[in-house]
Amino acid sequence: MSDSLPNPVWTTCKDAAGIAGNIFAFGLFVSPIPTYRRIIRNRSTEQFSGLPYIYALMNCLICMWYGTPLVSDDNLLLVTVNSFGAVFQLAYTVLFIIYAERRIKVRTLASLLAVLSLFAIIAVGSLQIADRMIRWILVGSLTVVSLISMFASPLFIINLVIQTKSVEFMPFYLSLSTFLMSTSFLLYGLLNFDAFVYVPNGIGTILGIIQLTLYFHYKKKSTQDSMEPLIVSHA
């Protein structure tokens, strides 16, 4: 499944990339905290949606399962990062359910139960496959689909930034954390010869570069535009 080299330098570089990915991912996991401070303070979910956290939970659970020794070799750093991610996303979802109005509360709870049930089916079902290679390919393919879908979700924001020529809806540190995390796991996957890791994270890295490029382009443009009235007023 993977052709890991016994070279200690190679292993150290791979582990370093995985640890860096874990650290940068933490920035993504804590990014919704300001939103939830507002929700708790106002005791209302307002116009926020709980679906992104449920989807992120599903993604973390699938990637965590892929990283276990039952599915793939030498991918424990995937287990750690996605275990923490799953805990954060579950906590966010539970808080959302607590403060949502009844109609949204029921719908969100149903979505959460559906995700947990689907993950249970994937985990138990994959264990029924005796051939470890087939199990690895099946769960790995699900991991790729899940990660690419997650990395593709900012495409809406990218389109919004281009249309509005404003970075208001694309927080810099969130885009930076996404880019750094994707790049770290791209290197981790390459050093571990694992296409199910480096392919989706390679796509995530490219999208991260696009987001950061757009941020600096439109941030600079916004700064220049905001200075124009001052220049005119002193002319």
Image: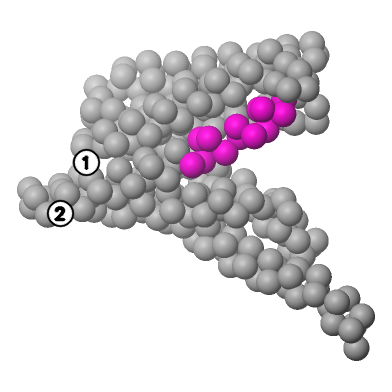
Q: Are marks 1 and 2 in contact (CB under 8 Å)?
A: no
Across and down, in percent, residue 100 comes to 75, 17
Q: Is residue 9 left or right of residue 32?
A: left
The image position of residue 50, as x and y in percent, is: 68, 26
Identified at 26% across, 33% down, the residue is 76
Residue furthest bottom in the image: 235
Q: Would you place residue 42 above or below residue 210 in this image?
A: above
- Name, please, the residue furthest toward the front: 234
Foreground mark, 1 or 2, reads: 2
**Label 1 is placed on what type of residue?**
Met
The label on residue 206 is: none
Q: Relative to 215, does residue 103 appear above or below in the rendering?
A: above
| Residue on which the image places disc 1 | 1
Q: Quick check: 38 left or right of 20?
A: right
Mark 2 crowdedness (10 Å alpha carbons): few <14, some 14-19, many ≥20 = some
As drawn, 198 above or below 29:
below
Q: Dot 2 corresponds to which residue?
A: 10
Question: Residue at (77%, 65%) from the top-left corner?
Answer: 165
Can residue 62 be seen? no
Q: CA distance from mark 1 to mark 2?
A: 18 Å
Mark 1 lies on a secondary structure that is loop
Most frequent secondary structure within the magenta stretch? helix
| Marks 1 and 2, the one that precedes in the sequence | 1
Residue at the spot x=49%, y=61% of the render?
206
Quadrant location of the C terminus in the rendered image: bottom right
Range of magenta residues: 27-39
Q: Is residue 147 visible?
A: yes
